[in-house]
Image (cartoon, rainbow, N blue to C red):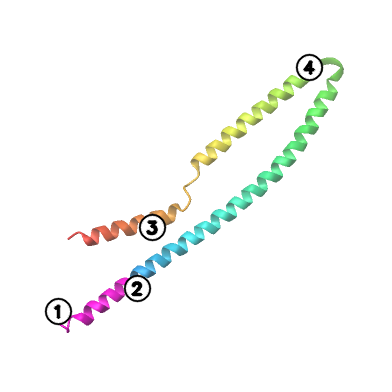
């Protein structure tokens, strides 16, 4: 039989534990929400800049290509076309390599949230081991 004088203390302790656990979950969810918003805003900015940059670069390259080919049309039209093709191939190779590097080096989404949850897990494991 449980002594009734210790039950309120146990109940209070369980209530505080539940309150602390809820507070911890709330904090971690708030952190995840902030990180999600930051990631969304960063992605929108990058996508907008990428689209504008690609369109502008496309027009510039098209204009430059036409200019080079027109300038060399009478003397070296095949050479001008070959050189422009090689320039575009080099630009494409560089941009694809750079995009791969950026994707590979980017931090994992929600890294801070996951790190905090891991710290919490380790703290609980240490406290539960006698």
Q: Nearer the viewer, residue 29 or 62?
A: 29
| Residue at the image position 61 percent from the left and 29 percent from the top | 93
First in residue order: circle 1 vs circle 4: 1
Mark 1 neighbour density, 10 Å: few (under 14) some (14–19) many (20 or more) = few
Tag 2–tag 1 contact (CB < 8 Å): no
First in residue order: circle 3 vs circle 2: 2
- Residue under numbered circle 1: 2
- Under circle 4, the secondary element is helix
Between marks 2 and 1, how big is the CA–CA gap?
A: 24 Å
- Residue under numbered circle 2: 19
Between marks 1 and 4, how big is the CA–CA gap?
A: 97 Å
First in residue order: circle 1 vs circle 3: 1
Residue 48 on image: x %, y %: 67, 49
Question: In the figure, residue 69 lies in which quadrant?
Answer: top right
- Under circle 2, the secondary element is helix
Q: Give the magenta range.
A: 1-19
- Under circle 1, the secondary element is loop
């Amino acid at each position: 039989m449980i002594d009734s004088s210790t039950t309120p203390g146990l109940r209070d302790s369980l209530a505080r534990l539940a309150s602390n656990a809820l507070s911890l979950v709330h904090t971690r969810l708030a952190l995840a929400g902030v990180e999600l918003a930051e990631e969304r805003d960063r992605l929108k900015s990058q996508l907008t800049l990428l689209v504008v940059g690609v369109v502008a670069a496309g027009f510039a390259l098209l204009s430059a290509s036409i200019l080079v080919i027109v300038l060399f049309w009478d003397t070296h039209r095949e050479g001008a076309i070959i050189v422009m093709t090689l320039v575009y191939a080099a630009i494409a190779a560089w941009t694809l390599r750079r995009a791969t590097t950026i994707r590979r080096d980017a931090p994992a989404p929600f890294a801070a949230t996951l790190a905090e949850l891991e710290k919490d897990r380790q703290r609980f494991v240490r406290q539960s081991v006698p």
